[in-house]
Image (tube, rainbow, N blue to C red):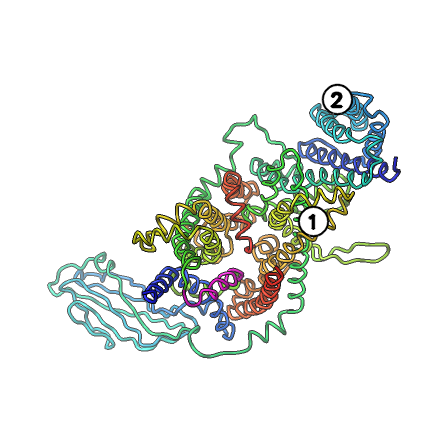
Amino acid sequence: MSDTLSKIEKRTAYILLLPAVFLVFSIILFPIFANVWISFKEVGLKDIRIPEPRAKKIVKSIKDSSDEIKIIYKLRNSSLILDIRDVKFQDKTPKNVEPVNLDERCQFKSNIINCNFGNWKAKYKENFQIILKNKKGEKIYKKEIKSIKPKLSGESDNILLNTNFTLKNFKKVFFQNEFFDLLMTTFYYTFFGTIGSIVFGILAAQLVNQKFFGRTFMRSILLFPYVGPVVALAYTWELLLDPYSGTLNNLLLNFQVIQEPLNLLGQKYLTINFFGFDLKLRLALTTVIIFEIWRYFPLAFLFILARLQAIPKELYEAADVDGAGPVQKFVSITLPQITAVISILFMIRFIWNFNKFEDIFLLTGGASGTRTLPINVYEQGFTISDIGMGSAVSIVIVALLLIFMFVYFRLLGKRADEN
Amino acid sequence: MKIRSLILYSFISSIFLFSVVSIWKILSTLQGIDLKNFNFAIILSLGIGISLINLVIGDKLNSYIKSIVFASFFTLIDGFIIQNMPIWYNIGVFGIIIFYSFKIDKYNQKNLELEHSSQSVLFEFLTLFGIVLFSFVILFPFYMMIVTSFKTQAALLINPLDFSINFAQDIKELFKSYFVIFDTYKFGRYILISTFVSVGTVIITLIFAIPAAYAVARLNFFGKNFLSTSILIIYMFPAIVLVIPLYTVFSQLGLRNNVGGLLIVYTATTLPVAIYMLQGYFKSIPKELEEAAIMDKLNWFGIIIKIILPLSIPAISSVALYVFMIAWNEFLFSLMFLDNPNSFTLSRAIQYLSGDAETPRQYLMAGSVVVTIPVLFIFVYFEKYLVSGLTAGSVKG
């Protein structure tokens, strides 16, 4: 009895899970594996289109004979690269109308013209002509002929489905793509963005954890950058930071903080003279990191605040009795209580900053030294139109992510063991 | 009295005063006032002076009278240094000093002698400083976005620092950018598409996620543990590594430029987190309720509809709002999948607008306001639900 019950339970579980699992599998897992496949292929953006046989039908009347009409089909292979095999053509004619001197590749039977065009090479073009005649000598109407559309079909190779593989893409990724530079920029961006958002998250959480007028209001405001749409915020910042008409530069100039405008998003390096040493600062990258921190510190704030509010008040009261000052209280009570949250946050933010695409794409498009790995996927795939290369870079990202996740889940596991 | 506390008290409070006055000056500059200098040295010494006098006077004077005296004194000197300021600027300065005086009022010679007094002073003013600075830095871009959308191209070019809005002008002139984006750039259509996609994603996600989450939370089946960890792992994979294969497959299937294609992708990407959030909540519902239902011969469909759903309204609202927010704000997939202006979402439409260098910036900002207002409104209105959604789903970036 219980055996059948558990069977029913299992079956129910699978039925309930099936739709979700199927969808996630086809839209998330399948593409990750498909990336591996594509990354070993030489595929450009233009190769993705499946070659189609096409025909444009042009109908012309013939002078002095209304019972005859000329049709010109402009036939072509839509692909510039791939051949189409075994092209079949079909068109219909109105009643009592039949073709005259039909091309030998075609047959006419019960008002249907069937043709077998054989193989079409890439870029193939042909003007194919048919003359129709009404058997009863009545007028043929152009409109009637035009309204019937020919049908074409053919077979072709799908470049994505054949089994020609190459290592070219990976060679290019590692040796021609300034890979080291790309990796360094990505880590620089990820690391400082993560640290920054956590530091500001702690500060903000400390603030809101105190009692003051308008505290709940403050909490809402602090989350605005995270909740707002990235497109709107990125463009607002772009206008704010514009070197000529941007508010920030004009304010700084007005109050004589700087002497000439700074191109905060368009300049790769800023040389700062620091006690006689010339320091080169990655200016655009720094700006992008600041935007990143501005947008994502609210998340760290939310996490840390939740943790802070869970710290028992007695701990602080006891510390008061012992005569501890605010700094001591923060260092010996607050910090140990939030280290667990901070380490988890660090891992999560690290992984997500590592993957960040939209923010940089919208602010700089990857120019002026802000090209990270995700930006490179887009550039390779859609700017340079090399799908294979884009996939290869994606694979590099996935590989690195798997390493991060491994570390992350190990840490989580340890945490769980300790508790 | 400890010297260290004294120095910290007067110095930190003055720095705080300086920063608030400076922010006021920045905001005033943006109303078209010609200010060129923050007068760091003068403001700082005035602040130090006032804070020290405050210590000397102590509670010999009523704090209201004290603050009014301080404020008038400061405003007079400030008005003397920077002349010909409009009256509202001076009123603002006056108000800031009143606030400042009340903040330093509670410090007197006695409590600066207490243990840790220097730390307390530091923390108090750092908190105030933090509140002012955080609010300013966060709200300023939003402020700029709104103001810019009400300006004209010419006005913006003549003086980029002039943020004043002329409310006296005709409504049609004031809201011109909004009329233009709705008339010329079809933003009405994009709002409809964005709403359709976001609401559609929420509905489909819930329909898929609720049964799955119930199975994970309650039923025993082979591979259950594996499934619940994979949910989290799958969730960590970013959109950017899915983009190329999805683009190629969707191109070949003719699903690009199709809102339906977008719906499928959004649903799939939000499903893992929705399942994760819901199963956590479902587990907290007492099992006895379902056992009673099984006695009553209810099948799983009945259990979900009659027992689980009514009890999970808060969790479902959190998930719904969170998914709505993700779908509404989503950009990468809409960039990849839509190139026909007839099927744009709002985010994609704004990006398309900005692609044309000729597009006046006020239109861009008007568009940005249009896409931002709904999420911020929903966020403020349903904050309680969304915050719990954000915390639970915040593995996502």
- The N terminus of chain B - image quarter: top right
> Residue A81 is drawn in which quadrant?
bottom left
Q: Is residue A154 left or right of residue A106?
A: right
Circle on res. A334: 1
Q: Is residue A204 left or right of residue B13?
A: left
- The C terminus of chain B - image quarter: bottom right
Q: Residue furthest left?
A: A136
Secondary structure at numbered mark 2: helix
**Residue density around tag 1, few if under 14, some if 14–19, many if 20 or more, within 10 Å:** some
Position of residue A111 measured from the top left corner of the image (x, y, whole percent): 17, 67
Q: Is residue B232 magenta?
A: yes
Residue nearest the observer in this picture, A35 or A260: A35
Question: What amino acid type should be assigned to the residue bearing mark 2?
Answer: Tyr
By secondary structure, the bulk of the magenta-drawn segment is best described as helix
Residue nearest the observer in this picture, A48 or A374: A374
| In the rendered image, residues at marks 1 and 2 fall on the same chain | no
Against A215, residue B350 (above or below) is below
Residue nearest the observer in this picture, B17 or B382: B382
Q: Which residues are magenta?
A: B221-238
Residue nearest the observer in this picture, B108 or B236: B108
Q: Chain of mark 1?
A: A
Against A376, residue B26 (above or below) is above
Question: What amino acid type should be assigned to the residue bearing mark 1?
Answer: Thr
